[in-house]
Image (spheres, helix red, strand yellow):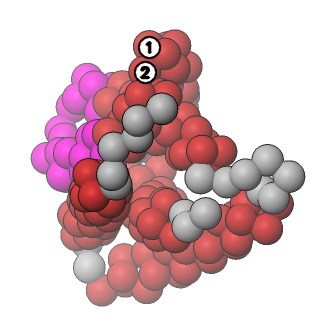
Amino acid sequence: MNIQWLIRSQSIVTLAAGMIYPYYLLFLKNLGNSYTKYGLAFAVFTISSAAVSQWVAPRLDMHAQRILILSSLGMMAAMLAFPWTTSYLWVLVLQLLMGTCNAMQKMSERLLLADYTERGARGAVIGSYHFWTSVASGFAVLLGGVLIDWLTINALFYLSAVLYGVSAWTVWKFSKVKQNIQSMKPPSYH
């Protein structure tokens, strides 16, 4: 099966996340000004991700592509909001949003990876998937390091937002192509 669209979209997500992540940690530390606040922000992220996973799970089979699009759009909104965040309370709200998007992204990514591969023939596809998303991650950290020397951290947040938007568009475009292909199939009279 062709899952190039999933590899591309999730490599873009990995690029967006990896490019900002090391600098986002510094941003959080500076805004929180204590390790307790820093830890609380990450706890809000992980606990919200766990809680949302229980709500998302029953909806995955029917709506995985939509959920994947929404997760990228939510992350795009968070990245656009971070440079304007001046209080710790808003950091926690954004961590809640990001935890929600994380659950949506991880769960739909895994379901789609299983759906677009065949039992007994998944290894090579998963290897390719892992390779390209890992390459994107490594490239992202390097790119972020170079860009932070030339730009501000706010510019990295905005660039990351653009990449999340491109990922959402990639999944949306594939789902439109898939709908068009399915609408051209002759009806089945079984």
| Residue ranking furthest to the left | 84
Secondary-structure class at tag 1: helix
Q: Is residue 52 left or right of residue 82?
A: right
| Residue ranking furthest to the right | 120
Which residue matches tag 1? 55
- Name the kind of residue labelled 2 in the image: Arg
Q: Residues within 10 Å of mark 1 (few under 14, many from 20)?
A: few
The residue positioned 51% from the left and 20% from the top of the image is: 57
Q: Is residue 184 left or right of residue 59?
A: left
Which segment is the magenta one? 69-95
Q: Is residue 169 left or right of residue 149?
A: left
Q: Position of residue 133 (x, y in %)?
A: 60, 67
The residue positioned 41% from the left and 35% from the top of the image is: 189
The residue positioned 55% from the left and 67% from the top of the image is: 2
The image quadrant of residue 67 is: top left
Rendered position, 90 above or below 70 = above
- Name the kind of residue labelled 1 in the image: Trp
Residues at marks 1 and 2 touching, judged by CB atoms closer than 8 Å: yes
Rendered position, 89 above or below 24 = above
Does 82 appear in magenta? yes
**Secondary structure mostly seen in the magenta stretch:** helix
Residue 177 visible within the image: yes
Foreground mark, 1 or 2, reads 2
The residue positioned 36% from the left and 77% from the top of the image is: 148
Cα distance in 3D space between marks 1 and 2 = 8 Å
Q: Is residue 136 left or right of residue 77?
A: right
Which residue matches tag 2? 59
Rendered position, 184 above or below 66 = below
Q: Nearer the viewer, residue 160 or 107?
A: 107
Q: Position of residue 80 (x, y in %)?
A: 18, 52
Secondary-structure class at tag 2: helix
